[in-house]
Image (tube, rainbow, N blue to C red):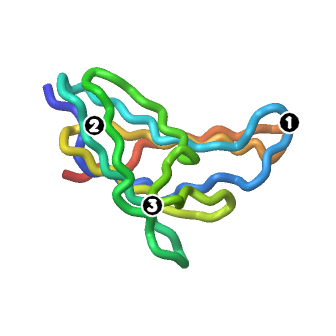
Amino acid sequence: MEIGRKAWIIPDAYTPPESSGKLESHEAICILNRNDQAAHLSIHLYFEDREPIEHIEYVIQGKRTKHLKTDSLHKDGESVPKGIPYAIEVNSDLPIVVQYSRLDATQSENALMTTLGFAQD
């Protein structure tokens, strides 16, 4: 049975600029590739007041999962800025599942949020 989609959108991405306590605020896109073959991803980041960062390439092997921290996404010296809202688009040549998670550690009472992205083929 095929599970997953080839296009995913996460419209509300944001890394808090500061953290308190032992944990650091961060976010991740969590990807599951149930296919036997490697999935080739193209990730695009969209902003309110600047040009997007497009075509960040990533390969996830077959029958694997990967938690990509968004601060690890780089293209031509550009990366995800902290404290700036943005959106994430993930495209794949094979069906995958994409979940988004954010840990907000700006207060001593940490908040963890997670959701599936919006999927489209």
Q: Nearer the viewer, mark 2 or mark 3?
A: 3
Residue behind mark 1: 21
Relative depth, front residue between 54 and 108: 54
Residue ID at (32%, 32%)? 60
Q: Position of residue 76 (x, y in %)?
A: 46, 60
Q: Secondary structure at mark 1?
A: loop
Q: Is residue 12 visible?
A: yes
Question: Is residue 28 positioned above or below 63 on the image?
Answer: below
Residue behind mark 2: 96
Q: Nearer the viewer, mark 3 or mark 1?
A: 3
Between disc 1 and disc 2, whose residue precedes? 1
Residue ID at (54%, 44%)? 72
Question: Is residue 60 positioned above or below 27 on the image?
Answer: above
Residue behind mark 3: 45
In the visual, does 87 lie left or right of 65?
Answer: right
Q: CA distance from mark 1 to mark 2?
A: 35 Å
